Image (spheres, rainbow, N blue to C red):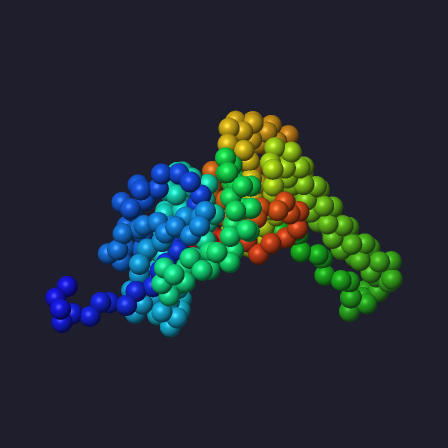
Amino acid sequence: MTPTETPTPTLTYAFAVCRGGALTALTALPGLDTGASVRTLTAGPLTAVVQNVPAAGFGEEALRRRLSDRDELERCARAHHTVITAASALAPTVPLPLATLYLDDDRAREALGERETSLLTALDRIAGRAEWGVKVYAPAGPPPPAPEAAPADGPADGPANGPASGRAYLDRVRTRQRSREQHHTLTLRAAERVDSAVRSLAVAARRLRPHGVEVTGKHRTQVLNAAYLLDQGRERELQAALASLRRDETDLQIELSGPWAPYSFADGGIADGGLTDGGTAAERRTSGRTPS
């Protein structure tokens, strides 16, 4: 830079927070491909994985435009996920949400210091563990036959069918409805058996919002979308358990994905049987995890 040039204003983009590990290999990653290297930033006992990004391209308005573009959102999310995945292979890693930005390194250190206790708690919980995703689908099946038209009071050239025929029609409608409800109940119970079996292997679990037809397609319905935190080395047990479940639950389609960095447990990893708002993604929330 010559004496007359003005430095380009930058922001500090944070991908993840780690503890320990040799993270120097991360400097070879392009990150968001801004021309600056991915680097580490020490904040007390924590190490943040960061990159300088141009303020003009990542300021509030510019960032809103960038993330409203589907292609650009996917590119940023995949880059974000790539850095997190690489970091988690080297050290316990808490992923940060997509587009976590600070005015400078000092502000980043200050923010991490404010969250130091919760981040250390999360790092303790996820050390030596990985996240696995299990999705369960039931076939949508053919639509039920349309109910016969309700009988009229009687044909123009014949006698009326009377109340008995009307009651028979309503009975057929109720029977079909009960059949659909019973089938749905049985499917949910089967999905709960899958969840229970995997939870028995996990140290924590999260139930995520099932995907709708726009993701699953019209031919199947997602009845379980869950994330599980497992100790490393239990992969074979998990795969064996799911293989057994596939043999027993023949009406279900069971999908396993992972291992992932622990996106669903970055807030401290408290086991949770309730619903969370997982499910954007590139894939989930704005974490940057790519779709599976």
Which residue is pictured at 56% across the width and 46% down the height?
121
Query: Where 219 sits versus 53, above or below?
Result: above
Q: What is the quadrant of residue 282 in the picture?
A: bottom left
* Res. 214 in view: no
Is 85 left or right of 236, judged from the image as shown?
A: left
Judged from this view, the residue extending furthest toward the front is: 44
Is 49 left or right of 163, judged from the image as shown?
A: left
User: What x and y, as percent, mark residue 250?
Assistant: 61, 33
Total marks drawn? 0
Please identify the quadrant where the N terminus is shown.
Answer: bottom left
Nearer to me, 172 or 124: 124
User: What x and y, as percent, mark residue 254?
Assistant: 56, 38
Query: Where 191 sits versus 33, above or below?
Result: above
Which residue is pictured at 81% across the width and 54% down the height?
171
Which residue is pictured at 30% across the width and 41% down the height?
25
* Res. 34 in view: yes
Query: Where 26 sits versus 201, above or below?
Result: below
Which residue is pictured at 60% across the width and 37% down the height?
203
User: What x and y, as percent, mark residue 17?
Assistant: 44, 49
Is 252 left or right of 49, judged from the image as shown?
A: right
Nearer to me, 110 or 96: 110
